[in-house]
Image: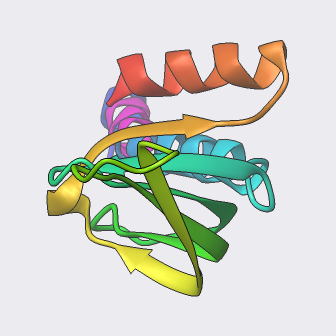
C-alpha cells in the first residue's frame, strides 16, 4: 500500500467519525439542560410545565414534577385550569412547542442546535 492509499483511508475514517462527534456534541448540549424547567405545548392545546428529566432518540420527552395547564371553555374566574401530574412522557408526535428556562448563552446554544438538525 502506498502513502496515497494510507492517506485516503485515514481521511475516510476521519470523515466517518464526524457524525459521531456531532452527535456527541449535541448530547452534551442537551445534558446541560437536564433539571431545567421546560414548558411543552401539545396539539390539543394543553401545556405541561416541569423539570426536564430526559429525551430519547425518537424525541419523546419526560418531565418530572409536571403540571398540566389547559384552557377552560366554561365561565369561571380563571380561563385556565391546572393539575399536578408528577412524571409524564410527552410523545414527539404530540409536541408543538418546547421552551426551556435557561440563560441567554444556553438559549443561543439551543438555537445553533436547532439549525444543525
**Residue found at x 42% / y 31%:** 7
Residue closest to the eye, 4 or 22: 22
Tell me residue 78's x, y (percent): 51, 45
Residue closest to the eye, 31 or 17: 31
> Which quadrant of the figure has residue 59?
bottom left
**Residue found at x 27% / y 67%:** 58
> Which quadrant of the figure has residue 49?
bottom right
Magenta stretch contains residue 83: no
Could you tell me what secondary structure mostly forms the magenta stretch? helix
Check the image and tell me how it is coloured.
rainbow
Tell me residue 2's x, y (percent): 35, 36
Tell me residue 12's x, y (percent): 33, 39
**Residue found at x 14% / y 60%:** 93
Q: Is residue 99 above or below residue 104?
A: below
Q: Is residue 59 above or below residue 71?
A: below
Q: Along the horizontal axis of the image, is 96 left or right of 28?
A: left
**Highlighted magenta segment, given as a residue range:** 6-15
In which quadrant will I find the C terminus?
A: top left
Q: Is residue 42 above or below residue 53?
A: above
Magenta stretch contains residue 14: yes
- Number of numbered discs present? 0
Residue closest to the eye, 21 or 41: 41
Tell me residue 100's x, y (percent): 64, 38
Amino acid at each position: 500500500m502506498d502513502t496515497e492509499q494510507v492517506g485516503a483511508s485515514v481521511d475516510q475514517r476521519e470523515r466517518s467519525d464526524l457524525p459521531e462527534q456531532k452527535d456527541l456534541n449535541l448530547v452534551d448540549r442537551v445534558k446541560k439542560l437536564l433539571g431545567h424547567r421546560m414548558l411543552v405545548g401539545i396539539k390539543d392545546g394543553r401545556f405541561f410545565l416541569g423539570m426536564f428529566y430526559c429525551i430519547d432518540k425518537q424525541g419523546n420527552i419526560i418531565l418530572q414534577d409536571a403540571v398540566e395547564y389547559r384552557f377552560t371553555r366554561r365561565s369561571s374566574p380563571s380561563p385556565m385550569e391546572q393539575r399536578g401530574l408528577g412524571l409524564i412522557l410527552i410523545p414527539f408526535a404530540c409536541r408543538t412547542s418546547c421552551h426551556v428556562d435557561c440563560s441567554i448563552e444556553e438559549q443561543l446554544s439551543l438555537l445553533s442546535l436547532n439549525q444543525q438538525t
